[in-house]
Image: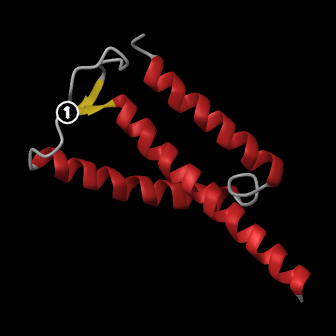
Amino acid sequence: MMFAYLGALLLAALGTGAMDARWRLAIFHDAGRALAAVGATAVVLLLIDMAGIATGNFRLGASPWMTGVEVLPHLPIEELVFIVFLAYVSLVAFSGAERVLVARRERRA
């Protein structure tokens, strides 16, 4: 069970990627800009995590669902995957919502 959380994150990322590919919302629309946005967002979120770790607010807990692999002290590999996934799913959701709103506006006009 130690790869359950990491596996769930990767499975969710695959689903998000499938939606992105189907409707060309982010990476499949403009890969360079999307990867830059995901990367920049991930860096900001990683810096926030590192500040939380440095101040003692974030600690690595024991869980049978996690691999136990730490990239840095108190920063598990799952956290890095989650940060990138969060940035990507947010971009896909924002792009999808924007497309729906634009289509709705065009239908009304």
Q: What residue is rendered at 82% in x and 47% in y?
A: 22
Quadrant where the N terminus sits is top left
Quarter where residue 65 is shown? top left
Residue closest to the far front: 108
Name, please, the residue furthest toward the left: 55
Query: On screen, 64 above or below 20?
Result: above
Q: Nearer the viewer, residue 80 or 35?
A: 80
SS category of the residue bearing label 1: loop
Q: Which of the image's four quarters has the C terminus?
A: bottom right
Instruction: Mark 1: give few (<14), some (14-19) or many (20+) Cα within 10 Å.
Output: some
Of residues 16 and 44, the one nearer the viewer is 16
Q: Position of residue 48 (x, y in %)?
A: 26, 55
Q: Which residue is mark 1?
A: 74
Question: Image check: 67 left or right of 50?
Answer: right
Residue 34 place in picture, x, y as percent: 62, 58
Give the residue displayed 44% in from the left and 24% down from the top: 5
Residue sitting farthest toward the top: 1
Q: Residue at x 60, y 29 (%)?
A: 11
| Number of numbered discs visible in the structure rendering | 1
Q: What residue sits 57% from the left and 50% below the top?
A: 89
Give the residue type that dot 1 points to.
Answer: His
User: What's the coloring here?
Assistant: secondary structure
Q: Position of residue 38 (x, y in %)?
A: 52, 55
Relative to 83, 34 lies left or right: right
> In this rendering, would 54 be left or right of 3?
left
Residue 31 lies, in percent from the top left, at 68, 55
